[in-house]
Image: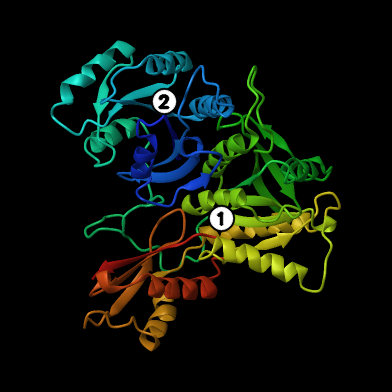
Amino acid sequence: MTHIIAIVGRPNVGKSTLFNRLCGGRDAIVDPVSGVTRDRHYGVGDWNGISYSAIDTGGYVDNSDDIFEEEIKKQVRLAIDEADVILFMVDAREGLTPMDEDVAVMLRRSKKRVLLVVNKVDSYKIVDQVHEFHRLGLGEIFSIASISGSGTGDLMDEIVRGFPGDAFPQPGDASPQPGDTSLQPVSPDDTYQPLSQPNIAIVGRPNAGKSSLLNVLLGNERNIVTPIPGTTRDSIHSHYQYFGLDFNLIDTAGIRKKAKVTENIEFYSVMRAIRSIESSDVCMLMVDAERGFESQDLNIFSLIEKNHKGVVILVNKWDLIEKENNTHKEFETHIREQISPFRDVPILFISVISKQRIFKAVETAVQVFKNRSRKIGTAALNEFILPIIQESPPPVSKGKYVRIKYAMQLPTVFPSFAFFCNHPQYLKEPYKRFIENKVREHFDFCGVPMEIYFRQK
């Protein structure tokens, strides 16, 4: 399971720089508002095999006349409420300020795990200045220089301390290393691993129809529904049976009400999506056909992909769209262009109100779970892929001929494959995509993110 790290502090202390370092240089999911310090960033990363989601909040300012500051403060409070660990950043060069003290008071009241991070300690002359921050009463101080990475290793060790380790590679994991005992092929005769009940989450922007879909599915008299207390905050799992389909449906449609807080709905929807995605095997991403596939939809899709979860895109309210001959194809083409290069995703056009293709959506989600669980025996994999590689070998790079000897599927919870060759460093992304597409097409991994690793034989 992934954990949420929230970075908070007053403006210009280096929160965004640390965020970029935590996410390993990946493209962060950004929903820009007005001004750099008001951006909301979401990303994923891992440290020594333990995965996490990171949130970069806007600078917390009190007693400001800026009309945006109250919204920023609300978002900071929401991030604090959802986070497993909070990084409270301060600036060593400017020293302790009254604003830092105000934030510290708020964090102490939160009862959350808080790590005090003193940034911009990039000179021996500043080292002794960090001790004044002990006055905040937040325990151990972590001195770092986020722009150079100094001290961030020790900080990361402390962040993940107590987080349960992941048994399998997570998003961003390095390629398998020589000597890994985990690199054992799956059983040569297995096509599928034994299937447990899948966890299917309904995610998406507000007002896309998530609540309506949930009500249609759970309100049918032929369903067998057993509410189970939520395992992740206020999410609720319901056991669902219908015409031979059997799975756990994760209720993520509702937005929790908070006393004396008017939520920023878009911000909160992404916060809930992060938790929902972590709890799921497959996500049904609801898109409002009237609004189209917008940047926030792509943001949530990226979270699903980076967490290696199965995905089905449901374009809801299709009955309200005025259609021409190619409306369906044009809409689908636009979505696939947006989510590229991971285009092998089922896209269904539905109407919850009229129940158009509702149960087809459920059947597709269960099939994606089966695809995600599929295990290919080493013999069957090599029998298929080696002739293709021989017919279309990797291009020569710097005078080196790359020869791929054999491949095997790794025992991960999502599809991942290791290809053993003589010069893995010369294999480029286009050839990796070529191999992935061939494996996808032949063994049917539709709707499932996949990892391809090239290893030294």
Seen at 38% across and 18% down, the residue is 100
Q: Which residue is mark 2?
A: 10
What numbered label is drawn on residue 2? none
Q: Nearer the viewer, residue 417 or 130?
A: 130
Q: Nearer the viewer, residue 52 or 263?
A: 263
- Where residue 389 appears, as percent x and y from the top left, is 38, 82
Left or right: residue 411 compared with residue 232 = left
- Where residue 68 appears, as percent x and y from the top left, is 57, 29
For the residue marked with disc 2, what is the amino acid? Answer: Arg
Going from N to C along the chain, the mark reached first, 2 or 1, is 2
Q: Nearer the viewer, residue 116 or 130?
A: 130
Seen at 84% across and 55% down, the residue is 320
Seen at 28% across and 17% down, the residue is 133
Left or right: residue 285 compared with residue 142 = right
- Quarter of the image that includes the N terminus: top left
When asked about the image quadrant of residue 150, the answer is top left
| Helix, strand or loop under label 2 | loop
- How far apart marks 2 and 1 lie (CA) works out to 38 Å
Q: Residues within 10 Å of mark 1 (few under 14, many from 20)?
A: many
Q: Which residue is mark 1?
A: 310
When asked about the image quadrant of residue 122, the answer is top left
Image height check: is 125 above or below 394?
above
- Residue that protrudes farthest toward the left in the picture: 124
Residue 227 seen: yes
- Residue that protrudes farthest toward the front in the picture: 65
Left or right: residue 56 compared with residue 178 = right
Q: How is the image coloured?
A: rainbow
- Where residue 443 appears, as percent x and y from the top left, is 52, 71
Front label number (2 vs 1): 2
For the residue marked with disc 1, what is the amino acid? Answer: Gly
When asked about the image quadrant of residue 391, the answer is bottom left
